[in-house]
Image: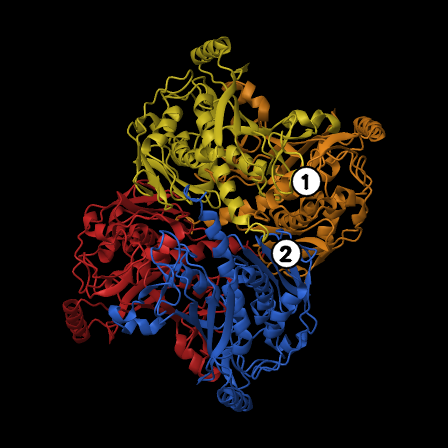
Chain colours: A blue, B red, C orange, D yellow
């Protein structure tokens, strides 16, 4: 299996099956001197954890205590690989015994079998959402690297079960509505999807590479690699396809005090941000803004027709501990993936600098 | 500048500025024995070409004659790198002289300056849409590799200037409507966006890697690396976020004659394809289906406020030969990028095979 | 720090500092279905371990018990990443306190400081030979993958302290001579170097890529990445530079029963093997044979002049537990690195196959 | 075929067969602002060219005129990919017709057939030494990048046909001796090998990565990827294996005026350079020094026994235009490969910088 290593300079490797001994990550390429401790990682893992109490999330209660095995000395990164291990403490494999020979609708059981002819069926194995714990740990390292540079990454649920959730936390009405809707779905043995909105603030202009390595391309790859993600859009997104150029172009404005702008020196922003923070694949200095769509959870209690490994049609009800709506747990994963991309592009940009004028 | 090399095994490198001597590509990793000649490449280049007569496209009339410099012998690929060069024959650089010190709204002029402090301003240089000629040439090689495997990649404009274009070519009414709308926009000095829909048929189950290398992640990166692309969605896409699990899951069905299905052997399909051709990041054997959103062309004749390199606010009208709507020319680029991904995943899958059962 | 990930398809990531909590590796890309257990890894770790009793090796007695955290299920690899952790159990950091501000001659203390301005001085940190435990663990996975294919990798000490050690174990005279010489060196506070010879048997013709990815290039990179290695030569090696073409060329001969050789089908070998197992960068089917030179251990008890971080000249005697001669412990590391390369080239070769004739 | 792309940030792709339309390269990742013109490249190509008049080199008279297709604007690099094409003007393919079905001893004909089952037999195709023209072109770009940083790379023949060639050009006696020996070999239809010595001066301390990406590992891979190279050694090299630690360690000395050395700031050198310019895989600031061994040319006029594709034993005399001794033409290729590595490590080092102390 390829594709467990992400990034080009700031790189993360994740490992682990949902019902094996542990999941985790190794982060390579994080520069030396970044303040980091296990609590930085544990904080984000708690947000991703099942049983965190968020409405609609599963009750599996993993403790998710990260252990840093390398790369940190006296509270700072050494520049060497940072290995983080998170033990799997609550494995009820027997829940999954009945699934060894059945293909759950909406799951990768069948495609995995078609690809490898061999799989760990327990809870999805490597294909399980548990795999994302390693991503969140790696993302926490990326965020620790970005924070002193003034860059923050924040993802939140902006729609769940068809109900919009405004950004300001003042409106608890929508949240209550979502909770009620999810309870109804749980009672019916059904599930919901939604949207995650993400914002990266403090981004300097100049990140991203102009051809294949465009900022939206790199973010798109990262976020679409999260299970259940079915789409992503930047800035005005799909709605931009309906606008005219004169409506869609953002007007450049000089920052105060930037008149007489010396060439090559930022000092410019935009009156609006329909571009969502990048032009020509390169960050503009405005916030990077994108939304990702997640399909409803595939594991549902409602009976569904399916097929098994004996080539028989049968009916299945997926029991076990499942989320009704993955969104609250998906948000920190989106955040982690975006942070990994931004950290990588930051280092990639450094390596490209060095016109003789500036060396 | 990084990010001019795309893929992991079947790889494409593109090069060239819009107003330099040539653009082109080198394809590495294409297996030996694939029938290929220059006309395979020229055919797709004609579809991408400005002045191809499609409504709303620019009049710059590049001949776009590809020359194959290596990798093909007696009409077949050698397995060695395939270099293709396309000369730039119609360079009116003087059109762009007035842009050397001005930042066009909606363009990467400013971000490029902020990143490099040095650029070829003529027609966007490497940041120009002309860069995609190299992608189309590389994609044509990928399609030549895929065709004998029964895999076809087809992209078409499914919405332009706000008007839906149905797939069947019978309805010329919508096309006429689009043409009329684009003429109006041209008259007003404005521009339009739209959607490209792409379908990959003949895909075997098993392509894509389950973690970071998911099929939608790889396609998403590829397509979002095309300039002006603002979003992508797979299968039911953003609409899936509004569905319940029981409505969204596709029902697995046995192919006729596949009862008693031996493990690991395909013989299964799905009654619907809301998943858009992948589950768990791996192809299901159903068609891969996705849509990409393109913003309206940024270069417009209408006066716009902007900023220049002297830190002054000024008004700009972008003259020169520009498309009103990029969509007809974007479709072959989407096709090329998707073909490159599928070719790469095909080889990646081969390298992963080899359970001892099957060796 | 870059360069902790090795390989292109069969890939190993290593992590860990000599005096941190653990060292280890993650192996990505090993196909599913390979029989593997922790004892396969432990066996090679014991050969690499200090205090293994080999003459001239250090007394630090690490237990080196590997724990497999992922990628193995029911005694076989899953195809997913295989994470292996080896705890550091015997850390006497205080031995190294006196070195925090001193640059040991022949060590990377100074270059590390010059590069990062920050280091874990305890026992060399990531720059320590302890880092190779992760390599040996990863190499054991590669050997488990290669064994069922009939490929074996064997490295042995062929020269130590200036004394040649013949391959057949019959001659214990040379070994006794080496032991005596090392005791003399230990008494004088000095150290020795030597040669490791490696042979890969069972290699099919066709591995290696003809341009940058030649078999000797890939092996050379792998082996020269081992600390203290100062040179490598293949087959006749440096002596070939003195031969004439008619003496150096190996004569091709048909294998018995291979007359009427069908094109593309092996059935040929060579009367001699001065090429050392590759021609044009591709394996010939003969044994791959190479030798690597290791410098004498840099840490010696003899007083040496050096410089410290305060910019003062001083005299240093390196105490602590050090090897007199690294060779016995270097051999399994050479073996591991060679195995990783061969596993990678094997998968790379699979991905390249697929001329239409053979698909 | 994989392995036509070299490097991680400063990267070169080469393409072309010896008897196809052209050979060439694309260099990706060279920063913007480097002065470069076609003559910089042509100069090195002339040194590599057959028929350059150096004793023992082939008479094939390629003109080798490089054309820069992209990446240079107004005499400076743009930061974008630099594509260079060198037309093959003197292709006498008919010389090779008799080789279509025969395996030349010491050549990759057989291994290529075993690998691909399909090849361009004319002059070795992609496996020909002509492929190195692309490397030399790419290396010239790397040298142009390094020159303003004060880094120079110089390779020279230090032994040919068994005769040592001292570095100072004063001694023309040895050169005359070599010429005489090669004439004798030519008369007998035989060939010679030799050594290339390379020195990189002006290297700052800190280049190279401490684990797999060690400076000698990266150089070793680069140089061993040149056809006919059978070994490489750094500094004292194989002779170091015979020394004792106290003899081999280089004594660190303070540069004048560097007392009170501030941490992290170079100001140190070594009394000797047996290490050959690196410690712990990282450059020390001393010259990088290595030697590479090349086997005698495999194509000889003397009759040799071999095997053909029909599985028959036969006798072969290799006619055509061949070098007697490849060494004079190998030196600029060694230089190019070393320059590519140093350029890449320079950019890799930049991306790793950024301890918070220094940002």
Mark 1 nearby-residue class (10 Å; few <14, some 14–19, many ≥20): many
Q: Which residue is mark 2?
A: A82
Mark 2 nearby-residue class (10 Å; few <14, some 14–19, many ≥20): many
**Residue D334 coordinates in the image, percent (x, y):** 48, 29
Q: Measuring 48% from the left and 39% from the top, which residue is drawn there? A: D343
Determine which of the numbered discs, if any, sits on residue C310 in the image.
Answer: none
State whether discs 2 and 1 lie on one chain.
Answer: no
Determine the chain carrying the residue at label 1: C
Circle 2 or circle 1, nearest the eye: 1
**Residue A143 coordinates in the image, percent (x, y):** 56, 63
The answer to whether any part of residue C289 appears in the image is: yes
**Mark 2 and mark 1: Cα distance apart in space:** 21 Å
Q: Which residue is mark 1?
A: C109
**Residue A318 coordinates in the image, percent (x, y):** 57, 81
Is residue A6 shown above or below B187? above
Determine the chain carrying the residue at label 2: A
SS for tag 1?
Answer: helix
The reply to whether dot 2 and dot 1 touch (C-beta < 8 Å) is: no
């Amino acid at each position: 299996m390829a594709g467990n290593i992400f990034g080009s300079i700031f790189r993360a490797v994740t490992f682990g099956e949902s019902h094996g001994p542990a999941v985790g990550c190794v982060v390579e390429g994080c520069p030396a001197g970044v303040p980091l401790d296990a609590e930085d990682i544990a904080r984000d893992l708690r947000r991703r954890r099942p049983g965190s109490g968020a409405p609609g999330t599963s009750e599996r209660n993993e403790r998710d205590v990260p252990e840093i095995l390398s790369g940190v000395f006296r509270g700072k990164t050494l520049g060497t690989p940072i290995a983080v291990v998170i033990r799997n403490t609550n494995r009820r494999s027997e829940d999954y015994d009945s699934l060894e020979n059945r293909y759950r609708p909406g799951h990768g059981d069948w495609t995995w079998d078609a690809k490898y002819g061999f799989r760990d069926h327990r809870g999805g194995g490597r294909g399980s959402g548990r795999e994302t714990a390693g991503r969140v740990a790696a993302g926490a390292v990326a965020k620790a690297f970005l924070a002193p540079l003034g860059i923050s990454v924040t993802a939140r649920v902006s729609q769940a079960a068809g109900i919009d959730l405004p950004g300001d936390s003042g409106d608890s009405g929508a949240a209550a509505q979502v909770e009620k809707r999810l309870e109804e779905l749980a009672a019916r043995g059904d599930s919901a999807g939604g949207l995650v909105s993400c914002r990266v603030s403090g981004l300097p202009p100049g990140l991203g590479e102009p051809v294949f390595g465009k900022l939206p391309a790199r973010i798109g790859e990262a976020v679409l690699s999260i299970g259940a993600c079915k789409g992503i859009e930047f800035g005005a997104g799909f709605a931009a396809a309906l606008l005219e150029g004169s409506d869609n172009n953002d007007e450049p404005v000089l920052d105060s005090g930037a008149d007489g702008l010396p060439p090559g020196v930022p000092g410019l922003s935009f009156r609006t941000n329909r571009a969502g923070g990048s032009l020509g694949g390169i960050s503009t200095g405005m916030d990077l803004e994108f939304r990702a769509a997640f399909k409803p959870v595939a594991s549902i209690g409602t009976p569904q027709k399916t097929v098994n490994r004996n080539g028989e049609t049968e009916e299945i009800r997926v029991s076990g501990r499942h989320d009704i709506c993955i969104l609250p747990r998906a948000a920190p994963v989106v955040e982690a993936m975006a942070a990994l991309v931004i950290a990588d592009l930051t280092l990639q940009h450094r390596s490209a600098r060095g016109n003789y004028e500036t060396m």
